[in-house]
Image: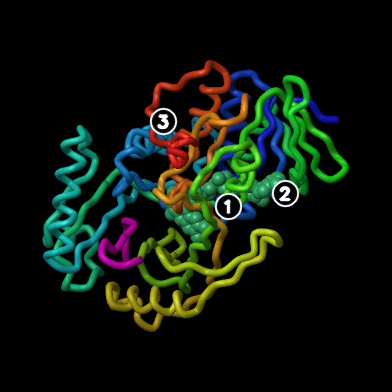
Amino acid sequence: MTIGDVLIIGGGLHGCSAALHLARRGLKPVILERDWPGRHASGVNAGGVRTLLRDPAEIPLALAARRMWHAIGELVDDDCGYKTVGQVAIAENDAEYDRLKARAGTVRQLGFDHEELIDRAALRSMVPSLARHCVGGLAVREDGFASPYHTSLAFRRKALALGARLFEGAEAERIDRVGENWRIEAGARTFEAPVLVNAAGAWAGEWAARLGDTVSFRHILPMMMVSERVPPLVEPVVIASGRPLSLKQMPNGTVIMGGGYLGFGDLRTGRNRTDFNGLQKSAATVAELFPALRGARIVRSWAGFEGRMADDIPVIGPSAAAPDAFHAFGFSGHGFQLAPIVGRILADLIATGETDLPIRPFSANRFAA
Ligand SMILES: Cc1cc2nc3c(=O)[nH]c(=O)nc-3n(C[C@H](O)[C@H](O)[C@H](O)COP(=O)(O)OP(=O)(O)OC[C@H]3O[C@@H](n4cnc5c(N)ncnc54)[C@H](O)[C@@H]3O)c2cc1C
């Protein structure tokens, strides 16, 4: 039997981030990972590090996470491929521009000033390759992107260096409360610890239900495409505000495209596939917005499992039903950026019972109400 201070189900970025922060506090976390860290959403996402257009409840966490991204090397001894290139949501017509303007006003009223409304000329100078019909946008110049698999490995490596233990190929199957401890059986192995963290990504809804929490959760499979290398085209990450698209160019010249269209997958086997209809629609949007990319070859496409909540914000914090159990799941397509701070929040909660960040909107029992 393996005994630790905290058992973490899931070795994605959130499981590894929680382990890293727990280990920094001197606790002994044990990560159970069915496959390997970065195998699912954490390793295959678009790498967007975005505070732009966050749900208001997420803004304080996203801004705190951004400060950590700007100094990510201090946290994990690795730059994670992170680049502060900015992100911009574009308006293709006046109605979209008015919506972005209203959004900027709402965010300002809430006391935040990180989102900047930009006019046609400012957008043109930020993204000269963008189609001429775009009328303006909403930008955050301190946002950026990182390399997802690289980041997953960096968090894993640092968590282990600080003393966390990771069991790959260990699928948590059975969970029991034994005295003051949680006991998990994974194949022939047994693990025990007084505290449990559910960071099982697209599989986390099932664990929340087993712990007695009623959450409105489903799994989705966002899709991505990458182009061949093309000459320098775009520096910031570009998001369409009126239709699904996010696009960024990597330092090697390839262009990563995604946003909105979903593939298919089987949670039980972990297998998934893309939907060519959706990919075709994404490609058509790219061709309209970036004329220079017409004719560029797509070299690969993929989909990844992700957990999505009915209200599109995650569950972060203690279980409402089970003692000494904590959740971090349901990131609804934007949990990569939040990973550095959510791990710290969980470690704070577990070690001290409190956190300095406002996590009430992410409670596990909000759906029961
Ligand atoms: C295609 C795509 C694009 C995205 N783009 C962005 C983006 O640009 N920016 C952004 O912020 N976010 C983005 N996201 C979302 C982001 O990737 C996720 O929110 C985040 O990675 C979730 O991390 P996680 O650790 O919770 O989940 P995962 O990375 O899925 O990790 C969960 C782990 O739990 C393991 N597991 C499950 N069940 C068990 C079990 N029973 N026992 C042991 N282990 C188990 C799984 O094998 C998995 O490795 C995107 C997601 C996808 C799929």
Q: Quadrant of residue 318?
A: top right
- In the rendered structure, which segment of residues is drawn in magenta? 233-244
Which quadrant is home to the N terminus? top right
Residue at disc 2, secondary structure: loop
Amino acid found under the numbered disc labelled 2: Arg
Residue corresponding to mark 2: 34
At x 46%, y 80%, the residue is 277
Q: Position of residue 44 (x, y in %)?
A: 55, 57
Residue corresponding to mark 1: 202
Residue at disc 3, secondary structure: loop
- Give 203 or 348, whichever is nearer the viewer: 203
Above-or-below relation of 100 to 363: below
Q: Nearer the viewer, mark 1 or mark 2?
A: 1
Q: Assess disc 1: are there few (<14), some (14-19) or many (≥20) residues with their C-alpha within 10 Å of its C-alpha.
A: many
Amino acid found under the numbered disc labelled 3: Ile
> Mark 1 vs ligand 1: CB under 8 Å?
yes
